[in-house]
Image (cartoon, helix red, strand yellow):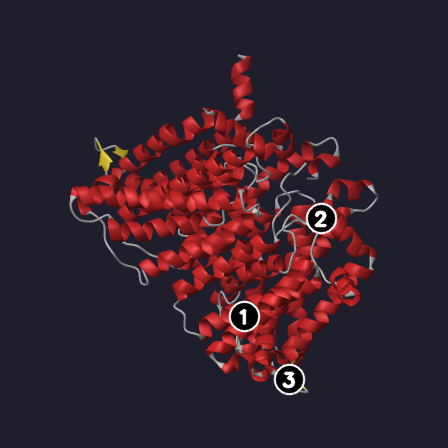
Amino acid sequence: MSNVRLWLAQNYAPILTAVVFAAMFGTYIGESSAGWKVAILDTAANNAVVLAIVAMAQTLVVITRGVDLSAGMIFIMANCIASALVVGSPGEVGLGIFGVLLAGTAAGLCNGLLVVLGRLPPIIVTLATGSIFSGIALSIRPTPGGSVNESLADFMTSDIFGAIPVSLILLLAIIVLIWVPFRMSVIGRYCYAAGSAESAAYMSGVPIGRAKLVAYTLAGLLGGIAGLFVTFVTDSGDAGASVGGTYTLNSIAAVVIGGTSLYGGVGGAIGSIFGAFTLRTIDDLLLVFRLPPLWQPLFQGFVLLCAVSLGAVRIFRLHNRLDGFQ
Amino acid sequence: MTLLAALRRKVDRPSLIASGAVVMLLLIGSLYSSNFVSPTYLLQQLQIGAFLGVITVGLLMVVLLGHVDLSIPWVVTMGGMMATAAGGFGQGGVALAIPFALLCGLFVGVINGIGVAFLRIPSMIFTLGVNAVVQGLVLLYTGGFAPQDRATALMHWLAVGAVFGVPSAALVWLLLLFVAAFVLRLTPLGRYIFAIGNRERATYLSGVDTRMILIFCFAASGMCSALSGVLLAGYSNMAYQAMGDPYLLPAFAGVVLGGANVLGGRGTVAGAAIGGLLVTILLSMLSVTQVPDADRRIIYGIIILVMMLIYGREARIHV
């Protein structure tokens, strides 16, 4: 019994986010004229999973008390590479996919090396590398275009057994194959330690540098997967700078909504996934409720602001005002 | 030798290296075309640099606290929009156009400050949310009916006019630099700002109401952004949607290239000014030499990284 309460207390933020998401998605399905259809589920899942994977990448870095402003740029770079490479025979497609994931991982590794060995603040490193990655994306795709292996794209964006979107299975696979091993591993613990108290972790002999390197590299790999998957959804590559920026900012918002602290050391990718789902559902809800288009940006901003302000509830429970100061 | 030593004590290393980089950029540019060292080009850079430089001064105040202000893009746009819109309301509107825009910037800045100081929400995410709300408000306002979007004569003159050959925009920038330097170096408030950047708890325990100072700095940043919006609207003679979007990253780059520590507590006004100028000249030269946009972004990123690796590295151990 006490174990359950402990678990609830430790995970209330992701659980709350999941409940909010379930309520919002239920409303969306209930209000939408088409009602419950797998096609609607597929579309919603496809869009949400892209942001969810980028948000997972962001989470890994945020846990180490960093921030990845290049997350969206790695994502569009992978998107552009995929739109050029993942075509042709099955063998070429396989090599192409490998290349895309390798590019994402290399980009993440670059960030990690600059942060760890270069000893630069993550915010500056990723700002600069983000500019470089978007430049690479733009040189591959000066204008939106390209294509991707159609049968693979059709499969990835459809559903199996007529009920479960493949995108959700992909997300589950990422959780099981990347997030859970990371969370359970010693190096994952080190990442949390480095994020919550870097000097204490250092004094305890934690290899902070190696831990951060793993976090950034995995973030790059996830960015690559997200870029690959969005290529299946849109069937093209788009290096528009605003796309990358929007994904970066939304990923940070999703991370915060999902209960991961920007001060590091607290939270996890599961919360971020629900955070991303919630953000995406807000857009869908606005459509369903036929809010005047002019009001939509304001409403989106307001919801975002309210969502991130939820974290402030903590401040009213503090006995000592000093505890609020970082 | 002693003079050099004295100078080195006076001027901090990042500002020195950044100035050196500015000179080097211009020299490299002069190999390509002698235009890059002509007085006309340099004065023009000062004029264009002012739009970014004004934002940089405000952002520096926030960065010194160890915070960031991501609401800059739409506060800039709002500043331009509100000034031109106020200009449409007759004689009084024209007179009050600039003060009104600054007031709007101040208001948004205070909201940012309240969120960060009292609600203790990380500035990175709170200012991001405020940016989205301001964007929504601006779109709602300009979409509902078409307000006047022409700049007033004063705005136009501030942006493109000149006093004895010196662009008036550069003079506005210079004035702002002096005000900021005065506040930071010669007033208690300036001391408190640096103190908060080093350790807010200690500053609070020393009897300073740090929350008011946080609000002050965010308000200053909001006003600077709005002022830049006013100048930009005057420059292109109109205000348009998303006019502030290209300025967030360069402003950030300018502040850190000028030697400010993003974790707070370290940085100079002169450095921020030189950093802003460096970014302006870099971007301008890359566009003049017709480097493709893609390569421009890559070069831009690499230069920031190299500069930071030269003088922005942190201590090996944080204990």
Amino acid of disc 3:
Ala
Residue B255 screen position, x and y as percent:
62, 59
To the question of a shared chain for discs 3 and 2, the answer is yes
Query: Which residue is found at the position 76% from the left and 62% from the top?
Result: B5
Chain at tag 2:
B
The residue tagged 1 is B25
Element under disc 1: helix
The residue tagged 2 is B197
User: Distance of mark 2 from mark 1, alpha carbons?
Assistant: 32 Å
Query: Which residue is found at the position 20% from the left and 45% from the top?
Result: A92
Judged left or right of residue B33, residue B196 is right
Element under disc 3: strand
To the question of a shared chain for discs 2 and 1, the answer is yes
Quarter of the view holding residue B295:
bottom left
State whether residue B193 is above or below residue A112. Answer: below
Residue B68 screen position, x and y as percent:
61, 52
State whether residue A157 is above or below residue A13. Answer: below
The residue tagged 3 is B162
In this view, the residue farthest toward the bottom is B164
Confirm whether residue A66 shows in the render: yes
Chain at tag 1:
B
